[in-house]
Amino acid sequence: MSLTKTFLSATAALALTAGSALADGPAIIYDLGGKFDKSFNESAFGGATRWAEEAGEEFAEFEITSDAQREQAIRRFAEAGNNPIVMAGFSWATPLSEAAGDYPDTKFVIIDMVVDAPNVRSVVFNEHEGSYLVGMLAAEASETDVVSFVGGMDIPLIRKFACGYAQGVLAVNPDATVISNMTGTTPAAWNDPVKGSELTLSQIGQGSDVVFAAAGGTGIGVLGTAADEGILSIGVDANQNYLYPGQVLTSMLKRVDNAVYEAFAAGADVEVGFNVMGVANEGVGYALDEFNAELITAEMQAMVDEAAAAITSGELMVHDYMSDETCPVLEF
Amino acid sequence: MDGMPKWADVVLVPVISLLLAAIISVIVFMAIGQNPWEAIKLMAYGAVGTSDFLGYTLFYATNFIFTGLCVAVAFHASLFNIGGEGQVLLGGLGAAIVCIFIPWPHWTLALVAGSAAAALFGALWVVIPAYLQARRGSHIVITTIMFNFMASGLLIFMLAGPLKPAGTMQVATGIFPEATHLPSLHDLAGVFGLDLFGRSPVNISIFLALAACVGVWALIWHTRLGFEIRALGRSESAAKYAGISAVNITMIALLISGGLAGMMAVNNTMGINSPQLVDNAAGGAGFIGIAVALMGRNHPVGIVIAALLFGALYQGGAELSAATSVQVQIVVVIQALVIMFTGALDEMVRSPIRKIFLRMDRSSAAGE
């Protein structure tokens, strides 16, 4: 009797959890890398979780398993009444342009791409500004005057990182050499730590003593090899300083989590239109914590903060590779 | 000889396999603290609960019909073509090239040309494995699966290079020209004043899939070529003795198989709401086709039914993970269980049942 009762109440409780995520709160859809990719998607998940903990509310989420599900996921949440619906990744642009018009009362937020529709907020990051700042730090920390960059897949977005980085390096030390390598031209380049490691070794062979990785999962191999070989590295997107304490110079922060958090916090009233997350509004920046405190001297910090202030005030313009697909200081 | 009546072969074995998969799924759901009954209800609702969901189920089923037929045709010749995945990608390349570079005046012409190109590219992709199998005896399983990787590499090269519109970052072609967009079933229903299938991408290529089923049925059971394919499949030495060229029939069967897989691309490139070719366009359909063919006993009718089931499972699973906190990985586990029991472990269920029927036969014979 009591066993049956326990079983029944347990069933009822489970039935409740099954339905809870159906609420009309915000929703987030992750890109193909999956929710726990230690990078972009996980950062978005982190922002959503932070909002949920602070607000004490829940959000709906979905991990797509194929491209066919993109438009389906958008429509599914829109029809269930979720608002706003956030999606992380440039591949969402096509399906969102297709679907957004059918749900004029729902707000959509796309990160890393621009979709021009009256109910869409497009969040893009000034990665070149953040990369400029870490480039300055790299030039200061370098003793060989040779620093390097390892990109993931060779796409305009990653060249934007590389170009900003090179500009930062040369601003501090005009005689420095910047070596730039891309891991590959296919999506596999995002998750190839072995090749990342090889590229780093090759760059060390050419004299580099600071390496910046903007390469997703490949970056783990870059940072690991740099630590093994005793040179400094720079992480990306999330704060990766903790991975090799004292050996990661800093991380170029791209606050995808903030973009998600802000959208969730604004709820259905989220502002639509074009939203740039740059140095000015703390969308990008460099990481300073107990793991790299000894590496960043007070002078270095003062110099970078000054540059950040100059970027904020518009005094300093960092060239954006994606504005004209050229880089004045780096050959690809 | 077999001892098993037709109905047991066609109905009983798949049903028992599904039940076994369902039992283990229930255990999985209970282990993660999810009410199995609620979960199964949600999956069923997600698959057929609304006109929109049904549309998605049919869209995925269309894919699986093509890949199921692809595997089945090769199976009839005793060949195991597991390169459907790569052949679909190449088919997509064919369809994309035809749609992007030729200005079609109307979608009907684009459909004909796109299907032909998709089938041609899919078939061409299997030429080398087929030749190696027919002439050199290189195992088709090994060669076709290797060709899947090459297809993926080739497609990414094309999509990251020659076919990529300038200034985009996604590894995909641009949207195909308006005139090549295939009408969706929603549009077709609209002609008759009906509002069906929401904005789901199910489109007229489902009729192409059904036509392909009829074509395969006619080919395998009502033509000389089909007879030769089946004869080769049952006994190569007997077929050779009867004057059938094993080399020719192996080549032809595999080319047809590849062509059918390639035609799936019509559905998932030209048929979708924003027609384009993306880098992982096949999305595993090539492999699900194996389970579909096994479960459908290599017969077009069985394949349609199995494809509908897998379409429902795929779509229902997506709804389950969207509507609850069930991880998408659990959904993949459930889908894999069904594939495993109906496909890979088919014989595990079949042979005990066969034994039971044999024993019943024998005891009734002894009783007389």
Image (spheres, rainbow, N blue to C red):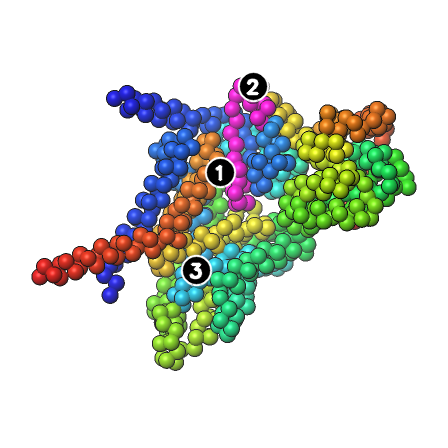
Magenta residue check for A236: no
Q: Which residue is mark 3?
A: B71
**Left-right relation of A59 to A272:** left
Name the spot of residue A37 as percent of width and height, x first.
Answer: 60, 38
Chain letter for mark 2: A
Name the spot of residue B137 as percent of width and height, x first.
Answer: 49, 71
Image point (75%, 34%), residue name:
A247
Q: Quadrant of the N terminus of chain A?
A: top left
Which image quadrant for residue B350?
bottom left
Image point (73%, 41%), residue name:
A228
Image point (41%, 30%), residue name:
B33
Relative vertical location of residue B57 with respect to residue B6 in this rendering, above or below: above
Question: Which region of the structure is painted magenta?
Answer: A48-76
Q: Which residue is mark 1?
A: B328
Q: Which mark is residue A55?
A: 2
Q: Amino acid at mark 3?
A: Val
Using a 10 Å C-alpha cutoff, classify the residue at mark 3 as few (fewer than 14 neighbours), some (14 to 19) or many (20 or more): many
Chain letter for mark 1: B
Chain letter for mark 3: B
Which type of secondary structure does the marked residue at label 2 adopt? helix
Q: Mark 3 and mark 1 in contact? Answer it, CB < 8 Å.
A: no
Q: Which mark is residue A39?
A: none
Q: CA distance from mark 1 to mark 2?
A: 25 Å
Please, which residue is most extreme toward the left here? Answer: B368
